[in-house]
Image: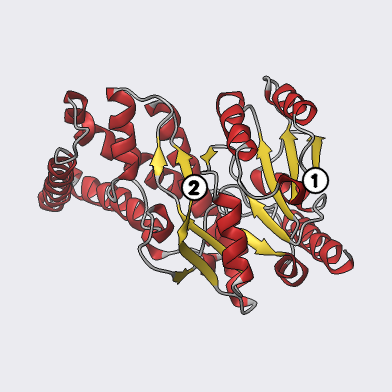
């Protein structure tokens, strides 16, 4: 069965070579693997890395490199989808590491009768030192990350609402269409909401695993959290049904800080003390649990400062997204047309 792996990349020279090596090492027959590599307007060596890989490895069914101007993730994915010929389409994030049985196991699960599948997505760090492991701990921790079930390898098969590095039968795109290009960071949530609404189940298999590289420094991590929060705020005004309530925990924390601070200024400081002390206790409790890890190091003492910086970034981002102007109607209409374009492509091919 022909499988298409889609990878989109913007200035990913730091990660792309490793991912392409992982693809080269796949046990699944390379004659049945098509690669669609989208260079999303990169100005580093991303394009050259793609070209070099295509020149050096001709045992794949096909390697297609698509060049386009810089755009958001959803636009990049739709571009890739419109160049696929496989019976199974697999999205592979450029910040990923995949084991040699990744494609093989996805195909087995799909062939067992599933239409959408994926697996656990543990975090890993590209910088294996004390500081890198401290950031990894902050990202892995429930207090620093999010509540998505696919973030950890599952012991048994389950059906969930969203998946990372998902594999899809071609029929899914023929029925659901493509990604919503009006969205920035929440395109996966909205797409998988439509997938489930269309009657498909999203299978998280214990046999499938891929790994996600965290940001390489705290500044990039904070920027990422702010951007994630911003798009949660923007999305709630147009597609609230695709979002989990847990995404709004950092926003609730920021809102409680704002309200309690205002009350403290006018002479009622009790609520502010309660908010700060409650957060501090939880912060220290989670940090204490982090020290139980075998890879603990002295830098873990910075976790009580790292956690609030990530939460404040996400919460402030959500607040800004909520008060920002809504997504323009013409942009939403354009996104709907692109969703339909992908749908028609898969219905006709």
Measured as percent of width and height from the top left, residue 262 is found at 24, 47
Which residue is located at x 75 percent, y 62 percent? Answer: 87
Classify residue 167 by image quadrant.
bottom right
- Is residue 277 shown to the viewer in this render? yes
Between 295 and 28, the one lying in front of the other is 28
Residue occupied by mark 1: 61
Residue 179 visible to an observer of this rendering? no
Q: Residue at x 38, y 68 (%)?
A: 156
N-term-proximal mark, 1 vs 2: 1
Count of all numbered marks drawn on residues in the image: 2
Question: As displayed, is residue 132 above or below residue 97?
Answer: above
- In this rendering, would 65 be left or right of 227? right
Q: Relative to 190, does residue 137 appear above or below in the rendering?
A: above
- Residue drawn where x is 39% and y is 64% of the image: 245
In x, y percent, where is residue 10?
65, 32
Q: Quadrant of the N terminus?
A: bottom right
As displayed, is residue 89 above or below residue 315?
A: below
Depth order, front residue of 186/317: 186
Element type at marker 1?
A: loop
Q: Which residue is mark 2?
A: 210
Q: CA distance from mark 1 to mark 2?
A: 23 Å
């Amino acid at each position: 069965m022909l499988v298409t792996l889609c990878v989109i990349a913007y200035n990913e020279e730091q990660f792309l070579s490793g991912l392409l090596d992982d693809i080269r090492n796949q046990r699944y027959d390379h004659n049945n693997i098509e690669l669609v590599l989208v260079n999303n307007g990169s100005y580093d060596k991303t394009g050259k890395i793609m070209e070099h890989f295509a020149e050096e490895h001709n045992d794949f069914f096909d390697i297609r490199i698509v060049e386009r101007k810089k755009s958001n993730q959803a636009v990049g994915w739709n571009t890739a989808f419109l160049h696929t010929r496989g019976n199974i389409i697999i999205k592979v994030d450029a910040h990923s590491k995949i084991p040699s049985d990744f494609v093989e196991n996805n195909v087995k699960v799909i062939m067992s009768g599933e239409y959408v599948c994926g697996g656990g997505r543990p975090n890993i760090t590209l910088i294996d030192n004390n500081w890198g492991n401290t950031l990894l701990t902050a990202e892995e921790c429930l207090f620093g990350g999010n509540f998505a079930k696919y973030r950890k390898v599952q012991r048994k098969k389950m059906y969930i609402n969203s998946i990372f590095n998902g594999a899809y039968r071609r029929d899914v795109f023929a029925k659901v269409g493509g990604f919503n290009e009006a969205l920035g960071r929440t395109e996966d949530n909205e797409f998988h909401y439509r997938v489930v609404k269309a009657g498909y189940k999203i299978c998280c298999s214990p046999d499938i695993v891929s790994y996600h590289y965290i940001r390489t420094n705290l500044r990039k991590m904070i920027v990422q959290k702010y951007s994630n929060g911003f798009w949660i705020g923007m999305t709630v005004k147009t597609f609230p049904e695709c979002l989990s309530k847990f995404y709004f925990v950092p926003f609730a924390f920021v809102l409680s800080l704002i309200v309690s601070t205002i009350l403290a200024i006018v002479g009622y400081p009790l609520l502010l003390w309660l908010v700060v002390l409650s957060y501090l206790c939880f912060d220290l409790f989670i940090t204490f649990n982090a020290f139980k890890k075998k890879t603990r190091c002295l830098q873990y003492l910075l976790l009580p400062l790292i956690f609030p910086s990530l939460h404040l970034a996400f919460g402030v981002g959500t607040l800004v997204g909520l008060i920002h102007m809504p997504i323009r109607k013409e942009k939403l209409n354009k996104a709907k047309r692109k969703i339909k374009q992908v749908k028609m492509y898969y219905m006709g091919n």
